[in-house]
Image (spheres, rainbow, N blue to C red):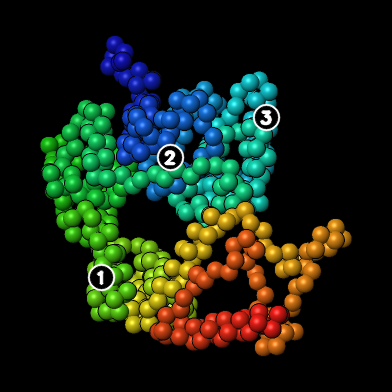
Amino acid sequence: MADLFGVPAPKETAQKLRPLADRLRPARLEDVVGQEHLTGPDGALTRMIASGSLGNIIFWGPPGTGKTTIARLLAGATSLHFEQISAIFSGVADLKKVFEAARLRLQNGVQTLLFVDEIHRFNRAQQDSFLPVVEDGTILLVGATTENPSFELNAALLSRARVLTMKRLEPEHLELLLQRAEAETDRALPLEDGARGLLAVMADGDGRAVLTLAEEVFRSTKPGETLDEDGLRRIVQRRAPVYDKSQDGHYNLISALHKAVRGSDPDAALYYLARMFDAGEDPLYLGRRIVRMASEDIGLADPQALVIALAAKDAYDYLGSPEGELAIAQACIYIATAPKSNAAYTAFKAAMRSAKEHGSLLPPKEILNAPTKLMSQEGYGAGYRYDHDEPDAFSGQNYFPEEMGRKRYYEPVERGFERELRKRLDYWDKLRRDRQKDGG
């Protein structure tokens, strides 16, 4: 409401000064877009709230998908005190203060929901500091990460939390956010249909980004002006992260690059790589994908493939654009022409399945160290055979838990260096059988 002279009231002015993304932050869980698998009527979070017990949560997903917003709404829906920290700006001293304040609150009957943004940025020791306060209920931890929690978070912390995946926002979700922005500002976005679609494409699944771009358009256009696609690009100075009219172009091209490498076609691989460079793709993203291809599709058929892929990433870090792009192209050619094997990839997946199935089994006592007298009395280390003292430096003893029996996950192919690895494995299998016949 304005005063008699038309000057906006302080609250009204403060509201308009807030960024559009903040003004449109949902006030209800059901207003969050794009995460219906969590917030819908049968969603995981909806069920948690209905049960009256949340538990510790790790949100894993791309930027701008609602991780912070949902954490705030969870605190409100369960009457918990909301506290937020960022792993980028917080250290051990900050954590101690937060934990102490949470303990005092708990003594007064109020539990704290601690939201930790970029939780993967904390080192292992810092992550360990959460364990006591999580276990005794001092805090309910809600962490947010854009990185794979399996690799970036301590197993102990992960075992005490449920990982919920946040999905990249689809074009229809971004369009809904643009409509909300128009309602909030009481203005239609001054964009032609093509430019409006391009704006969503530029946001690349990030809800916060699409609202920031919309605000930039509102701020930069003249009265009565309507922007086409070129005009939008000129205003926001950002290239779309996709490479054709299809909004799936980004994923289509990286898929095509991966398939061309797997299919040993360096020319097609270079073509798709060049298209992505030309469209403004982040070269480090391409470098990461090539590292992945070296592990997944070449593996130990050519152990140098991973080394060269990592060296290309380092070369780009050192040289920058455009000089460093050549190193990534060189690595792309190398892995496309390398012998192919997914044996290591397949073996790792099989071992992970076994780990989940037999994760509680203990290794054989004879291969475990016995640092204490009690452990020695219990048979730890008894009967261990030091392979370097055995004929052919090979004892052939069992290393698997006794309940499992011996497993074979890794099956090298008859290509590249893996042909040599298969010879070694076959040789050791023969020695192992011979030792067992001899009673060794």
Q: Amino acid at mark 2?
A: Lys
Residue 80 visible, this angle:
yes
Which one is in front, 12 or 55?
55
Would you say 202 lies left or right of 120 here? left
x, y percentage for residue 322?
Answer: 34, 72
Q: Residue at x 27, y 28 (%)?
A: 184
x, y percentage for residue 95?
Answer: 64, 40
- Label 3's element? helix
- In which quarter of the view is residue 427 placed? bottom right
Mark 2 / mark 1, whichever is N-terminal: 2
Q: Amino acid at mark 3?
A: Arg
Q: Amino acid at mark 1?
A: Tyr
x, y percentage for residue 32?
Answer: 34, 33
Residue contact between numbered discs 3 and 2, judged by CB atoms under 8 Å? no
Residue 63, compared with residue 296, is above or below; it is above
Residue 255, compared with residue 132, is above or below; it is below
Mark 3 / mark 2, whichever is N-terminal: 2
Q: Which residue is mark 3?
A: 103
Q: Work out how far the residue at label 3 is from the one at label 2, CA to CA, in angstroms.
A: 25 Å
Q: Which residue is mark 1?
A: 272
Would you say 167 lies left or right of 226 here? right
- Label 1's element? helix
- In which quarter of the view is residue 183 placed? top left
Residue farthest toward the top in the current orientation of the protein? 4
Q: Which residue is mark 2?
A: 67
Q: Work out how far the residue at label 1 is from the one at label 3, CA to CA, in angstroms.
A: 55 Å
Which one is in front, 320 or 327?
327
Residue 124, numbered label: none
